[in-house]
Amino acid sequence: MINFRQAAAFLLIFLSGLGVGLLVAWVIAPVEYVDATPALLRSDYKDQYRLLVASAYAANGNLERARSRLSLLEDPDPVQVLTAQAQRSLAAGQPWESVRLLAALASALQNTSPVVSSPSPTLASLALPQEETPTVPPTPRPDSPSPAETPSPAFVTATQVPSLVIPPTPRPTRTPTATPGALFVLTRQDVICNPALPDGLLQITVLDAARKPVPGIEITITWSSGEERFFTGLKPDVGNGYADFIMAPDVIYTLRLAPGGTFVSDLAAPICPTEGGEIYLGGLRLEFQQP
Amino acid sequence: MPRWALFLLVFALGVTAGLIYGWVIAPVQYTETAPASLRADYRTDYVLMVAETFHVEQDAALAVRRLSVLGSEPPETIVLQALDFAQQGGYVQEDLSLLAALAQAVRLVTQGGAP
């Protein structure tokens, strides 16, 4: 018969054993994680990954492949994440080229919708349970020749491979934008006299033909003693197609939108009167749209 | 059963329960991994991205730097592993060519020659 003291001792010993077991399992010999997905990457590596996706997109122009790759990161809104990263890069003084690549990909994604007509599995959607290693039937890319057509000693079909083979991201067809390549034209230019806004605020909104904001549009502003370049969408909290700039008093600016080079000259901060008769520096609001 | 054996048995039960809980029920969750821990197919796609970019930039040193996050192995080995996986996985010839070109360029850089 076990008395109370013995039961307490057994419990203590059991808990000691439990503690040792957990120490081994969590600290000394934790589960080795060697098959991670991109979604598990640390945030700085995710930034690096996105930049590489953007670079590869700039190199191959394959938007669906870029979209598939970005989906592996499981960002809730890839466009917004890309623009936010571009903004961070700009603020951190990283090379302009990186900012441009990120913004260009964000813009391309914003202007197209995913291809949904054909099954185009991403690597993630083809991921198999870790415990099993079945053979996955090959899913050749739409533009890839079938193995039967191109017998090549270096080309091993999945049916010949006994272990797990995950096909690469499918080669997609490009989805046309709503108004591909169309120039942006200035549709509105308003003087804004609002003392609540920063002095000399130049607000720029870029819309596509469907009046959807377009991020990643490069804007160059030049004046007699300088030049500044930035992109729409770097303030996603205000709008994906929004950008702004602070104008100095008595300076004439020229604005140019990179795609097509839409040009607006003689921009200057207006002088606005307050109700009390004083004056302050007002702002401008420009709206560009694709026809 | 002697008392010491009973204690040992209870201790062993505790250890077993701890290991089952720590390894199976609630294993350590890694949420901030490095690219080196990516699964083979994701690694291959990462290398392919480097290859696609290299094809345009022709900057082998930059490609080597990009590959360095995939582990401590020589960059050429990383690319060759990716090429091997791509061949087995039925990647299109264009991608295989890009990977092969990257492997060659990386080999030249790591051997001290110009790409």
Image (cartoon, helix red, strand yellow):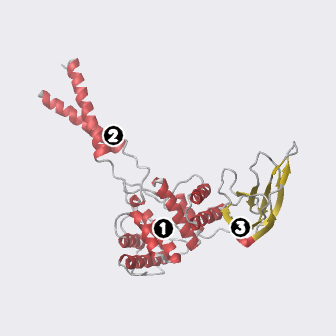
x and y percent of residue A158 in the render? Answer: 42, 70
Please indicate, yes or no, whether residue A182 appears anywhere in the rendered image.
Answer: no
**Label 1 Cα crowd, 10 Å radius (few <14 / some 14-19 / many 20+):** many
Judged left or right of residue A201, residue A37 is left
Image quadrant assignment for residue A65: bottom right
| CB-based contact (under 8 Å), mark 2 and mark 3 | no
Rendered residue at 42%/71% (across/down): B64
| CB-based contact (under 8 Å), mark 1 and mark 2 | no
First of labels 3, 1 by sequence position: 1
Q: How many marks?
A: 3
> Mark 2 sits on what residue?
B21
x and y percent of residue A96 in the render? Answer: 59, 66
Residue type pointed to by label 1: Pro
x and y percent of residue A23 in the render? Answer: 29, 40
> Mark 3 sits on what residue?
A225
Residue type pointed to by label 3: Ser
> Mark 1 sits on what residue?
A168
Secondary structure under tag 1 reads loop
Q: Is residue A265 above or below residue A201?
A: below
Chain of the residue on which disc 1 is drawn? A
Residue type pointed to by label 2: Tyr
| C-alpha gap between disc 3 and disc 1 | 50 Å
| C-alpha gap between disc 1 and disc 2 | 36 Å
